[in-house]
């Protein structure tokens, strides 16, 4: 079993009292599965996505449950530093708001450098080689994109850059938090076709695909 989620409960403390965002959520994902989570705005889809990473911040709190990831154990028992070691290598997430997910002072190449350096890869030539390959796989021209800053990229291009970044260490589990929500119809189809192709090429064992899913 790649992922086993058992009775996860998440609450938020507000001025009006405690609000339960997730109430005893349980599901399992086998390697190779694609799982979609459907729900209206505010129903807790993004909360679910980030709870899998043990990444709920105050005033949110994971009250109980288990998130068992193959080869890692219970994500909810990991400290912040241990979560950082697992993130990108075992499990990765493509966040919902691409416009807020990239550092505007860094070009795309530096985003790859920063991500890979966090896991001990500091060979600039190797990083650029990996970046070029992944950008090509998400249908972007490395000659154009590598030295570009976020404000120089369209929404669809930024989304594809983030997908490429999420694949640098070929994680077992990839979580996408509404990867097409802010895109026009043409780019929505492009991203969905791209994700299907990546999955079929076995770049990752699983794609958890909210838009149809998390928020």
Image (spheres, rainbow, N blue to C red):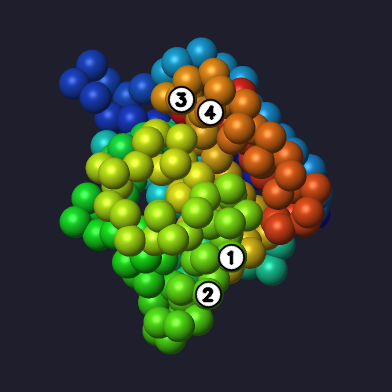
Nearest to the observer: residue 112 or residue 133: 133
Of pointers 2 and 4, the one earlier in the residue sequence: 2
Give the residue displayed 50% in from the left and 45% down from the top: 160
Cα distance in 3D space between marks 4 and 1: 21 Å
Cα distance in 3D space between marks 2 and 4: 26 Å
Q: Is residue 108 left or right of residue 192?
A: left
Bin the neighbour count of mark 3 within 10 Å (Cα to Cα): few under 14, some 14-19, many 20 and up.
some
The image position of residue 107, as x and y in percent, is 29, 59
Nearest to the observer: residue 164 or residue 141: 141
Kindly identify which residue carries mark 1: 133
Give the residue displayed 45% in from the left and 83% down from the top: 125
Bin the neighbour count of mark 2 within 10 Å (Cα to Cα): few under 14, some 14-19, many 20 and up.
few
**Is the Cβ of the residue at disc 1 closer than 8 Å to that at disc 2?**
yes
Question: Judging from the image, what secondary structure is the residue with disc 4 in?
Answer: helix
**Is the Cβ of the residue at disc 4 closer than 8 Å to that at disc 3?**
yes
Disc assigned to residue 129: 2
Kindly identify which residue carries mark 3: 183
Disc assigned to residue 187: 4
Cα distance in 3D space between marks 1 and 2: 6 Å
In the displayed structure, 12 sits above or below 204; it is above
**Is the Cβ of the residue at disc 2 closer than 8 Å to that at disc 3?**
no
Question: Judging from the image, what secondary structure is the residue with disc 3 in?
Answer: loop
Bin the neighbour count of mark 4 within 10 Å (Cα to Cα): few under 14, some 14-19, many 20 and up.
some
Give the residue displayed 37% in from the left and 72% down from the top: 113
């Amino acid at each position: 079993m790649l992922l086993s989620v058992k009775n996860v409960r998440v609450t938020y403390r507000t001025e009006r009292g405690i609000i339960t965002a997730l109430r005893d959520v349980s599901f399992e994902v086998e390697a190779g599965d694609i799982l979609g989570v459907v729900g209206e705005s505010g129903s807790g889809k993004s909360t679910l996505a980030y709870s899998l990473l043990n990444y709920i911040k105050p005033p949110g709190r994971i009250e109980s449950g288990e998130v068992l990831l193959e080869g890692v154990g219970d994500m909810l028992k990991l400290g912040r530093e241990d979560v950082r070691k697992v993130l990108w290598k075992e499990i990765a997430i493509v966040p919902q708001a691409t416009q807020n997910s990239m550092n505007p002072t860094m070009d795309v190449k530096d985003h790859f450098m920063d991500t890979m350096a966090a896991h001990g890869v500091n060979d600039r030539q190797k990083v650029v080689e990996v970046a070029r390959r992944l950008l090509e796989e998400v249908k972007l021209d490395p000659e154009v994109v590598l030295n570009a800053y976020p404000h120089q990229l369209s929404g669809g291009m930024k989304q594809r850059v983030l997908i490429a970044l999420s694949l640098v260490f070929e994680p077992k589990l990839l979580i996408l938090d509404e990867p097409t929500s802010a895109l026009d119809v043409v780019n929505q189809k492009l991203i969905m076709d791209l994700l299907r192709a990546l999955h079929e090429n076995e770049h990752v064992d699983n794609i958890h695909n909210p838009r149809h899913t998390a928020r």
